[in-house]
Image (tube, grey):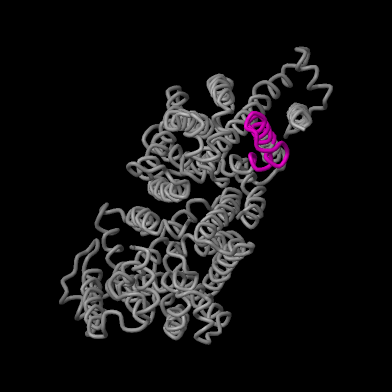
Amino acid sequence: MKKNRKLDDRTTVIPDLRGKSYFGLFLLLGILLLLLSVAASISFGSASMSLKMAWTAIFNFDPELTEHQIIHALRIPRTAADIIAGMCLAVAGAVMQGYTRNPLADSGLMGVNAGAALAMAVTLVFLPGQLQTTTLLVSFIGAGLGAGLTYLAASLNRSGMTPQRLVLAGISITMLFGAVGSFISLNYGIGRALAYWTSGSVAGATWVEIRLVIPWFLGGLALSLFIARSITVLNLGEEIAKGFGQRIVLVKMIATLAVLLLAGVAVALVGPIGFVGLIIPHIMRFFVGVDYRYIIPASAIYGGALMVVADIAGRLINRPAETALGIIFAMIGVPFFLLIASKERRAFK
Amino acid sequence: MKVVKSHKATIWILSLLILLIAGAILSLNMGKVSLNPLEVFQVLLGQGPEEHNLVVYKFRLPRIVLAILVGFGMALAGAVMQALLRNDLADPGMLGISSGSGLMVLLIISTVSIQGAAITLLLPSMAFLGGLLAAALIYVLAYRKRRMISSTRLVLTGVAINMGFSALSLFLTLKLDDQKYEFAQRWQAGCLWGDKWSYISLLAPWVLLLFAYILSNFRTLNVLVLGNEISIGLGVAVKKKFLRLAIAAVGIASGCVALGGSIFFIGLISPHVARKLVGHDYKVLLPTSALIGALLLLVADTIARTVSFKSDIPAGIIVTMLSVPYFLYLLMRSK
């Protein structure tokens, strides 16, 4: 009985599941949440600022004031990095889950983060003190390598790619890259530097970095929105998608490119953080239905908001020390993973 | 037909045993201080010079024995877990048992100093406790009332537990000072650090006793692989046996992790290779995979010991790098 209902959900209702006005309201709520968290993020910190101060620092910048300097040089880039990384991870997760039809797809589980982390280890050792452009490029390449290998290992099989196989392939690639990474870090004594980077932090975000990633970020976001409709159709199954006259290979290629761009940007900005891309799309599907034209923008907004909130929490939990974002998300993400895994048990049979 | 088969298995087990002994002797000759076979032989007969005695008895031999024991135990634990979960891809590392032990070890090193006598017993026993804790947690989370535990569910739960423990470990790791950090990193990467006779005299009886217990239950394992319903039909008290064997497997794995660090993949790969060699009968499969595991870790550790990198590279890293490609190959071929 339950099975039938689920099937109906997927096949009959492609476009407006809950109505445009409802979606608009939901998105508006998200934007409100995002703005609130941004305000909080700028005014909270080791030196608390009033919102008014933050406001004047942004719109009436006075270089003479230390507070304005702090806000301008530290708080704003940090918050911007949060928003960009959160949006990237959430959208990348949504796209990945959509086109692989895998409820457990996430950049942390699919080798993307491990690849980028290994690339970062290589950079730290062999190309120390490089320009941020190089670092960004290297982590892109690493992310691509990790995702490519995972995807290849999971799909090169007569019976095709199953969610379970993808998870196992992702974990083994992660372990392999992790082993090579610890080999390098033990051999060259960069363990701690790498551990800090791996744990995920936006504390060091600068304007230069933000400016550097923005074009890639916008490009990835635009690509995702551009193929949102195709992903919705693809999510119904390849046969149906073919029936709609969709060019599956092209869509998948664009989707992969978008995921790599977005995950690469996020990893370069904050380090390899898992679970954001897993959690947000699931919650969005619950609220806005199965249409990726709604899921993707909603994921972007709420992903950005979640990341800002998590960063504030990281600053507050263990004052004056900061708790790494990777740890906060793992604490939220693991129970969530268990929940999804138990709900989607049918998919693993 | 059956006779021929068991004959073949005996030959395999015997040749693996000989290979292992030969490997151990070869490994004894290799290292940063080079000893030729004659010198090693002299030491073993008790006629070597003091310096050589020290190298062999204090440094090389315990490390070799430990590598063999840990590999043996991990592979055995893997073989049992694969039978219990009816999943070829089960492994103590992947199921979060290693990271449970790891977390406990980290907890100890971050609160207590790593030198001192108390640590000798504290570290392995806490690692053991951590492994049991992880296993219990997986069981509780995967348990459903009045339903048999599905193996996929156990594996996915294990993956989740693994990620959670790793995050907690990371949290603790970031607070360590440099010296402790390096110890922790080596430990997590699977470094055979417990190479002292005092540790080995604890681990060896533990592994061998549990091995004997598990081997005496080979019939149960053979039946359990067929599935719960069939096992019940054949008169096996599934729940009781399942629990006992699971505790035994976790016991071995945690003991090995305690002294050898988180060594992944040995428990996964060895039973696979063993199945290819001797088939599916657990009576021969158990000793064969244990021997393969021992051999694998001995080779990896000998490489780690003799190839000179800038720093000591844990054997676990070498095992992972050697066996992931093979695992991916298995994954591609699995149904």
**Chain part drawn in magenta:** B270-295
Quarter occupied by residue B45: top right
Quadrant that contains the C terminus of chain B: bottom right
Residue at screen point 75% across, 12% down: B46
Quadrant that contains the N terminus of chain B: top right
Q: Main secondary structure of the magenta part?
A: helix
Residue reaching furthest to the front: B233
Across and down, in percent, residue A94 comes to 41, 72
Across and down, in percent, residue B139 comes to 39, 40
Using residue A308 as the reference point, say whether residue B125 is left or right of it.
right
Q: Is residue B161 magenta?
A: no
Across and down, in percent, residue B113 comes to 41, 32
Evaluate whether residue B279 shows in this view.
yes
Q: Is residue B287 magenta?
A: yes
> Image height check: is B331 above or below A19?
above
Quarter occupied by residue B14: top right
Residue at screen point 17% across, 74% down: A51
Across and down, in percent, residue A203 comes to 36, 64
